[in-house]
Amino acid sequence: MKISVTCQCGKRLAASPALAGKRVKCPACGAALIVPEGDDLAAVRPVATGDAASDLWDDLPALAAANRSKSEDTLAAHHAATANQLLEEARTHVVEQKKKEDAWGTGQIISGLATMVFAGLWIGLALIGGRIPLYSPFLFFTGAIAFANGVLQKVNRSK
Ligand SMILES: [Zn+2]
């Protein structure tokens, strides 16, 4: 059962019974108060200010608990916001990474095809000219590898 205390500043406070008869400091205005004892709910006697400031309000379970839960809520909200931000950044990163990979795959396919066409023409011209192509088949092979890489990348990503 909390003891009701009304400060001279008008602030209504609930003090722990453990503080009955003790001198405390009003959290609102800082005035020194004496918590009434037992059922004595009479006006609180103001005491001379300038006394050693009492930190007893800090021991008030209700006040302390309220403050603690408030700061815990703030901390939890902060953590949640930070987590959301990190998650959002990670998502953005993954999307950008996928775009890069996609562009890379497309580039591999296009350059691979271009290389194969070029090498194919080279081989054809060499054969028409009656020469045995040496470098162009290797180039064709290189283009085919690039093309296959690009296609594999696309296939893997669509899974
Ligand atoms: Zn007060």
Image (tube, helix red, strand yellow):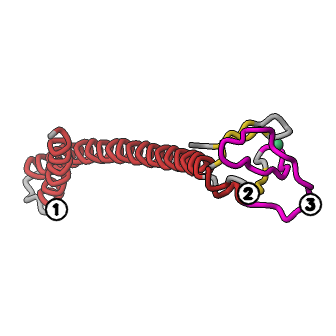
In magenta segment, residue 2 = no
Name the outermost residue toward the top.
Answer: 10
Going from N to C along the chain, the mark reached first, 3 or 1, is 3
What SS does tag 3 mark?
loop
Name the outermost residue toward the bottom.
Answer: 52
Tag 2: amino acid:
Lys
Which residues, given as a range, are shown in magenta? Answer: 28-55
Q: Are marks 3 and 1 in contact (CB under 8 Å)?
A: no
Quadrant of image for the C terminus: top left
Q: Residues within 10 Å of mark 3 (few under 14, many from 20)?
A: few
Q: Which residue is mark 2?
A: 22
96 vs 3, left or right, is left
Quadrant of image for the N terminus: top right
Q: Nearer the viewer, mark 2 or mark 3?
A: 2
In magenta segment, residue 47 = yes
Which is more toward the observer, 34 or 68?
Answer: 34
Going from N to C along the chain, the mark reached first, 2 or 3, is 2
156 vs 132, left or right, is right
Residue 63's disc is none
75 vs 18, left or right, is left
Residue 50's disc is 3
Q: Which residue is pictured at 43% across the width and 42% down the height? A: 88
Q: Which residue is mark 1?
A: 135
Tag 1: amino acid:
Tyr
Could you say where residue 111 lies in the image, as x and y percent from the top left? 26, 46
Could you say where residue 19 lies in the image, as x and y percent from the top left? 67, 55
What SS does tag 1 mark?
helix
Q: Are marks 2 and 3 in contact (CB under 8 Å)?
A: no
Tag 3: amino acid:
Gly
| Ligand 1 image position (quadrant) | top right
What secondary structure do most residues of the magenta stretch adopt?
loop
Q: CA distance from mark 3 to mark 1?
A: 98 Å
